[in-house]
Amino acid sequence: MKKVLVVLLVIVVAVVGYLAYLGAFGAVKVTEQKVGPYNLLFVEQKGDYGQTGKTINIVADAVKAAGVTPEAGFGIYYDNPRQVKKADLRADAGMIVAAADWKKVAKLKKQFKTRVFAKQGCLVTEMPFRGGISIYVGIMKVYPSLAKAAEEKKAKMGSVMELYVPGKTITYILPIKK
């Protein structure tokens, strides 16, 4: 019986430790700041948001093949999955490319869409990015905090951009639209 309790205790401690490592217990601090501009190279998607990672990797591989190190991966999520059918969800997914490297990826503009995310006032927060599970932890923790902050600012909860820097952070950006 003692061995079973010790094993259970070790499992609980390991799970709690892993969740702490993922940022599950940290406070979500949403700030208002100007962000951008970002040069976006992306694919428009329709359907399951779970496919975004694959799309980001496709764009990243093309950018790297062009001799460019992208600044970050990103997804812009236009619809609330609680209100829109999975098949109808819309997103843009791709890479942010530094302005200095924009000419190097010119040939990719035939394969991917481009746009500049203009400098603008946004609600912003970050979570640690320590693998795919970090994305799910962020969804559960961050989106309610962003919605609350938007409500306090009397802003609309619209599209949200997530910037992914593997091994570092996921930055959540909600443009403020009043």
Image (cartoon, rainbow, N blue to C red):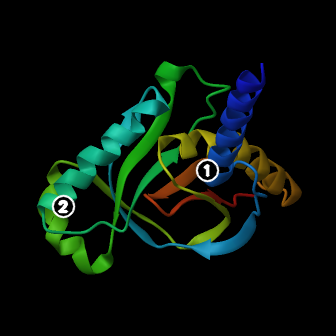
Residue drawn at the location 66% of the way across and 65% of the way down: 122
Pinpoint residue 59: horizontal percent, then vertical percent.
26, 50
Quick check: 112 left or right of 72? Answer: left
Which residue, given by chain and number where applicable, does mark 1 sit on? 22
Mark 1 residue crowding within 10 angstroms, few (<14) / some (14–19) / many (20+)? many
Instruction: Give the number of the disc on residue 90.
Output: none
In the image, residue 24 sits, relative to residue 85, either above or below, namely below
Quick check: 26 left or right of 61? Answer: right
Between 115 and 23, the residue placed more toward the observer is 23
Quick check: 94 left or right of 47? Answer: left
Secondary element type, mark 2: helix
- The quarter in which the C terminus is drawn is bottom right
Q: Amino acid at mark 2?
A: Lys
Pinpoint residue 110: horizontal percent, then vertical percent.
15, 51
In the image, residue 137 sits, relative to residue 102, either above or below, namely above
Q: How many marks?
A: 2
Mark 2 residue crowding within 10 angstroms, few (<14) / some (14–19) / many (20+)? few
Which image quadrant for residue 126? bottom right
Q: Amino acid at mark 1?
A: Leu
Closer to the N terminus: mark 2 or mark 1? 1
Secondary element type, mark 1: helix
Residue drawn at the location 17% of the way across and 53% of the way down: 62
Pinpoint residue 125: horizontal percent, then vertical percent.
67, 62
Which residue, given by chain and number where applicable, does mark 2 sit on? 64
Quick check: 101 left or right of 162? Answer: left
Between 2 and 155, the residue placed more toward the observer is 2
Label 2, label 1: how many angstroms apart (C-alpha)?
28 Å
Pinpoint residue 8: horizontal percent, then vertical percent.
72, 28
In the image, residue 148 sits, relative to residue 67, either above or below, namely above
Q: Is residue 113 visible?
A: yes
Q: Is residue 156 visible?
A: no
